[in-house]
Image (cartoon, rainbow, N blue to C red):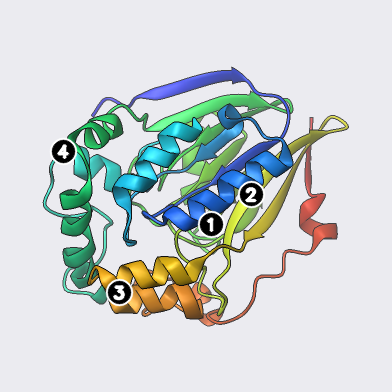
């Protein structure tokens, strides 16, 4: 399959990176306000895909995203919706709880999205690249080869290094796995902002995004959490008979199951992320 890659050229100023909106309109509204407060222009706000997902307002979410003017690559959900596929293409194990739940929320999303919104999804690129702080940066959903590939902090380095080689970049901004992390490999940096549509299995309803900055000739990144009106998002999921297990996760911050997680990530279930500002906020890649 030919890949559509958009090159943005040089980017300056703060950048807001996020993923997995998952049809969670309330989370997207809150993040849009953050971009205003931080003074980040819409063209410097980039989503790693899966604008559509588990929650109750897919059409409203697409409309707000487009109105905002942020940029996004395609997630596996957008690909599947555009191709009129029968499932979300999330690479869940057949017969697993996630697979069974997808048989509820994916048809719901299909039924609620306008033809215009689905057509727009077909315009999204597979990857975005840009030059920032003296580094070549690429955006992927899962991996370069497979949109739905789950890559976590604990995933083998050789898998990540393969992606750097394929993309010819120094920094990868990735999505899909649902958990925020950062990994330095030699002179490369793999960043996952986490997602804003669902909590990160840490026992809190907060969700995660990331800000990039170019300060004193260095690339700096900060993991940040977002608080939003999760009660409304929860209520709308219940009203529309979407999986209650996912709706409960919006409130209690714990995933219903850990089918997709490697053993290392399973062990940190219910433990709050503590991205030490001294270690992470000022973590740099020298230019």
Q: Crowding at label 4, few (<14), some or many (≥20) Cα neighbours within 10 Å?
A: few
Q: Please, what secondary structure does the residue beneath circle 1 have?
A: loop
Q: Crowding at label 2, few (<14), some or many (≥20) Cα neighbours within 10 Å?
A: many
Q: Which residue is mark 1?
A: 194
Q: Earlier in the sequence, mark 4 or mark 1?
A: 4
Q: Please, what secondary structure does the residue beneath circle 3 have?
A: helix
Name the residue located 28 percent from the left edge and 56 percent from the top edge: 90
Q: Is residue 244 above or below residue 32?
A: below
Return the residue nearer the eye: 163 or 277: 277
Q: Earlier in the sequence, mark 2 or mark 1?
A: 1
Q: Residue furthest right?
A: 216
Image quarter where the C terminus lies is top right
Q: Earlier in the sequence, mark 4 or mark 3?
A: 4
Q: Which residue is mark 4?
A: 83
140 displayed left or right of 135: left
Q: Which residue is mark 2?
A: 210
């Amino acid at each position: 399959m030919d890949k559509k890659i958009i090159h943005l050229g040089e980017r300056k100023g703060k950048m807001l990176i996020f993923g997995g909106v998952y049809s969670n309109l309330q989370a997207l509204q809150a993040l849009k306000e953050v971009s205003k407060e931080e003074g980040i222009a819409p063209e410097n706000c980039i989503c790693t895909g899966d604008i559509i997902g588990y929650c109750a307002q897919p059409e409203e979410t697409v409309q707000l995203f487009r109105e905002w003017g942020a940029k996004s690559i395609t997630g596996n959900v957008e690909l599947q919706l555009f191709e009129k596929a029968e499932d979300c293409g999330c690479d869940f194990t057949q017969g697993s709880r996630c697979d069974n739940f997808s048989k509820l929320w994916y048809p719901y999303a299909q039924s609620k999205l306008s033809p215009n919104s689905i057509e727009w999804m077909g315009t999204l690129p597979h990857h975005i690249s840009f030059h920032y702080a003296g580094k070549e940066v690429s955006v992927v959903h899962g991996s370069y080869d497979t949109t739905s590939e789950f890559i976590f902090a604990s995933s083998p380095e050789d898998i990540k290094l393969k992606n750097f080689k394929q993309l010819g970049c120094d920094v990868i901004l990735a999505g899909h796995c649902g958990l925020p992390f950062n990994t330095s490999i030699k002179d490369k940096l793999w960043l996952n902002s986490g997602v804003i549509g669902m909590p990160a299995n840490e026992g809190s309803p907060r969700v995660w995004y990331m800000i990039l900055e170019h300060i004193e000739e260095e690339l700096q990144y900060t993991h940040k959490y977002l608080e939003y009106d999760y009660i409304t998002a929860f209520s709308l999921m219940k009203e529309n008979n979407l999986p209650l297990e996912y709706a409960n996760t919006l409130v209690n911050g714990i995933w219903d199951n850990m089918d997709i997680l490697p053993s290392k990530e399973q062990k940190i279930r219910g433990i709050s992320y503590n991205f030490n500002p001294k270690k992470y906020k000022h973590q740099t890649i020298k230019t």
